[in-house]
Amino acid sequence: MNYIGDKLKNLRQQLGLTQTEMAAGVISVSFYSKVERGLNDIGVNDFLEILKSHDVTPKEFFGDITSEENNEKKLNDLFDRFIKVATEDNDVEINKVIKDLDKIKIQTPSIKFTKLAAKLIANTHDKKAIRRLTSKQKNQIKKMIFQKDTDGNEYYRIVILANIIRIYSIEEATFLVKNIIRRYSNSGNLENKIEVALSVLMVNYVNWCIELGKFNFCYEPLNFLKKLPEKMDLAFAKILGLYFGDLVGNKNDEANEIRVILNKAGYSIFVDKIVK
């Protein structure tokens, strides 16, 4: 049984590394490749050095490395919690969630990107924070969002865009939103979390457009929002879509009725943040 080789391969895949990166210059790539296949035995010192190179302890390695599923569940729970506290502008809870993300072992690419997303949103989650960013910082964030490492997780990229859309000019944001609408308009059977992320993006973008008086920019995203499935997870965004539609259509009385209902339902934090 190729116990060590199989576990090294499993660890390497969790970390998202190539065999060259995993070998870390400790042993040759060809030798390492044979270790994974059970054709070579690796020395104790070389083995420990490889683990050290990737910040993995022997205890973590010989423990249940396949507990990645548990880590992923914890990761999703933390990120859902993070989105909630970020929306509420709760800086104390935002930092708590980021600290909890740091505690997750092993730091897979998914976990690393989630931490990046959380830290980006934490630093830009309100108008004041965004205004403090320099042009250079904004450009760095833009590059980070669309770097190659994010391609495998569209969900996180949409979530980030939804929360930091205002680092762009309204013209840049409109270009991005239109492209996303085109990409997903005819996509069937989307993951529920992607639908939710898309709904948040549309709501935040339309809210900004109305603030700027760009009513003509609102029709396409509002129509996209309306066509999303009738699910409970999307209900709040769809209600906001109706509210924005009333504002754009100059139906102020109907819009005020929705604000009253949302306030009565306990959504006063959100109501205070949306455009009137």
Image (cartoon, grey):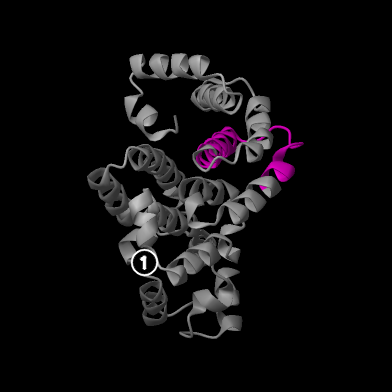
- Residue at 42% x, 80% y is 43
Q: Nearer the viewer, residue 129 or 47?
A: 129
Q: Quadrant of residue 149?
A: bottom right
Residue 8 shows up from this direction: no
The boundaries of the magenta stretch are: 180-209
What residue is disc 1 on? 56
- Residue at 69% x, 46% y is 178
Q: Residues within 10 Å of mark 1 (few under 14, many from 20)?
A: some
Question: Is 185 a magenta residue?
Answer: yes
Q: Would residue 120 be found to the left or right of residue 153 on screen?
A: left
Residue 186 shows up from this direction: yes
Considering only vertical position in the picture, is 158 above or below 22? above
Q: Quadrant of the C terminus?
A: top left
- Residue at 45% x, 72% y is 136
Q: Secondary structure at mark 1?
A: loop
Q: Position of residue 88 (x, y in %)?
A: 33, 37
Q: Would residue 33 be found to the left or right of residue 268 on screen?
A: right
